[in-house]
Image (cartoon, rainbow, N blue to C red):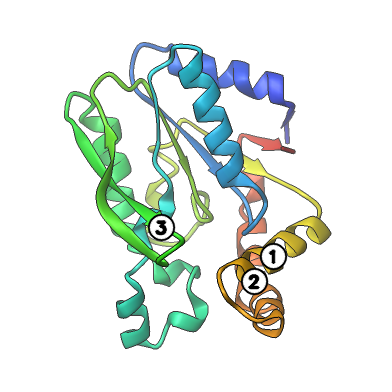
Amino acid sequence: MQTLDAAAAYDRAVELATRGRRQILGITGAPAAGKSTYAEQLTAKLSADGHQVALVPMDGYHLAQSVLEDLGLAGVKGAPHTFDGYGFVALLRRLKESPDEQIWAPRFDRSIEDSIAASIGIAPSVTLVVTEGNYLLLDESPWTGLRALIDQCWYVEVTEGLRHARLEARHRAFGRSAEEAHERTYGSDERNAHLIAATAPAADAIIHP
């Protein structure tokens, strides 16, 4: 498995952005590995350098909190079946196959723990879509449909100690008690992390942000 440093990863992203037809770059990894931060920083640098790039996170396809509560799934929020996976696959297919359309994607707002529809605009001028999320390489339906749409997919990897510390801090920041944060980090989050780690061999490269 190839490992890319920051400079090599940026050069590869530029190559994707300048191919002349829209490309999709996926950034995946376990919860709190840093994939969102890395994707945001990469997108910002590419944009600052004049490339037409859009960031479209998978998190916009979380099922609504009210739906999760109705279905009894709030306690495992973040697991594959708590997303509209088919909707996300359909969005990436549209982004790939209909580049001349103005397309709108949903955005997940952590402050309200819910998604906001049609809040990310992807203009026809965008030549590179960066998408990030946990299950871009998951070999289960409907997620298996993503790999054919994503031109490059990179797996973000950090030490388990750092990842756990970030997760507990994140949960505390959003109002959970220390006990609840610990339970979530080493419970449903950890189960998801093991599932995601098993997908790493399918990535095109490993990133250590």
Q: Is residue 32 left or right of residue 53?
A: right
Q: At numbered mark 3, what does the secondary structure look like: helix, strand or loop? A: strand
Pick whichever, 100 or 202, lies toward us: 100
Mark 2 neighbour density, 10 Å: few (under 14) some (14–19) many (20 or more): some
Q: Earlier in the sequence, mark 3 or mark 1?
A: 3
Q: At numbered mark 1, what does the secondary structure look like: helix, strand or loop? A: helix
* Residue pointed to by mark 3: 109
Q: CA distance from mark 3 to mark 1?
A: 18 Å
Q: Earlier in the sequence, mark 3 or mark 2?
A: 3
Q: Quadrant of residue 208?
A: top right
Q: Is residue 203 left or right of residue 147?
A: right
* Residue pointed to by mark 1: 169
- Residue 193, numbered label: none
Marks 2/1 in contact by CB < 8 Å: the verdict is yes
Q: Residue at x 56, y 29 (%)?
A: 42
* Vertical comparison of 141 with 171: above or below: above
* Residue pointed to by mark 2: 172
